[in-house]
Image (spheres, rainbow, N blue to C red):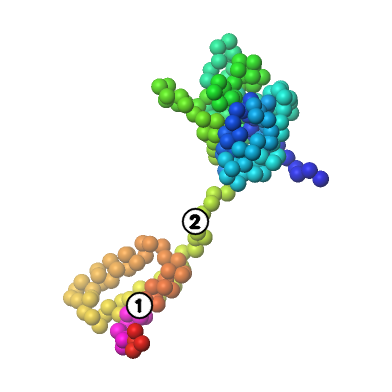
Amino acid sequence: MPAKIDTAKPVIVLVRPQLGENIGKAARAMLNFGLVELRLVSPRDGWPNPSAGPAAAGADVVLEKAAVHETLADAVADCANVYATTVRKRGVTKPVLTPEEAARAVHSEPGRSAYVFGPERSGLETDDVALARAIVTVPINPEFGSLNLAQAVILLAYEWSKHAALEQPTVEELLPPAPQEELEGMIVQLENLLQPTGYFRPESRAAATRRTLRNMLTKPGWNHLEVRTMRGVLSALGKGPRDPDPKG
């Protein structure tokens, strides 16, 4: 049974792409933001292309499922909302959207959507743009408009992902804050260690000093593991120095 297609996700269509490396890089950009359906229109060097795999850097699932079409009309035949990524074309009257505006439209409009990208050197032709419902143009430095294919794909994929509630990767699992009882035990332990040293003298300043110490220790929002570790440190300090290890 074929895998079920997620019709809420836009299709990425590359029209007459020239280099296999660029197709691979586009696939890599797609998968970073959860897009997996790639359609190719008359790729110059045919398909599959051995140069695409290494450039995809592991996005093999996108390349393996890539479909090849002879014309753009065939590639977007099942799509109700087609967005042509290009500069404004003379003789073509279409709504012009930013990537963010296009992303909101994709999420709000019924039917399948497609982002269409042109060849690396020349971009989409006027007849290609004529098939689209709207043009997507990236606000860019007018003195240097030089996005490559993968960069253009990643811009649109990223804007789409912002509205898709993708799970954000985390560096580590965050532990919940320690309960007040554990934090209080740590503070009391530290105060008991400091008391014999005369740290809280003079007596007239003892309450203020304890309050400042407490404020310092409650700011970080210690978790259970951190409190336990610090109490271990305090216990070790309270025991004083050990005899040197005879073996060391």
> Which of the labelled discs sits on residue 234, or is there none?
1
Q: Nearer the viewer, residue 237 or 64?
A: 64
Percent across and percent down for residue 175 are 49, 63
Residue 227 shows in this picture: yes
> Which of the labelled discs sits on residue 171, or is there none?
2
Give the answer, above or below, for where 131 lies relative to 193.
Answer: above
Q: Nearer the viewer, residue 176 or 39?
A: 39
Percent across and percent down for residue 33 are 58, 42
Give the answer, above or below, for where 245 lies relative to 176.
Answer: below
Which residue sits at x=53%, y=20%? 87
Q: CA distance from mark 1 to mark 2?
A: 29 Å
Question: Residue 235, located in which quarter of the rendered image?
Answer: bottom left
Query: Could you say whether the residue bearing mark 2 is in a helix, strand or loop?
Result: loop
Which residue sits at x=54%, y=49%? 168
**Quadrant showing the C terminus:** bottom left
Amino acid on which disc 2 is placed:
Val
Left-right relation of 194 to 5: left
Where are the magenta residues, as a range?
234-244
Residue 160 shows in this picture: no
Query: Which marked residue is nearer to the observer: mark 1 or mark 2?
Result: 2
Give the answer, above or below, for where 15 lies relative to 58.
Answer: above
Question: Residue 215, located in which quarter of the rendered image?
Answer: bottom left
Which residue sits at x=55%, y=15%? 89
Q: Nearer the viewer, residue 170 or 20?
A: 20
Check residue 171 for magenta coloring: no
Percent across and percent down for residue 68 are 71, 31
Query: Could you say whether the residue bearing mark 1 is in a helix, strand or loop?
Result: helix
Amino acid on which disc 1 is placed:
Leu
Which residue sits at x=62%, y=41%? 53
**Quadrant showing the N terminus:** top right
Neighbor class of circle 1 (other Cα within 10 Å; few <14, some 14-19, many 20+) is some
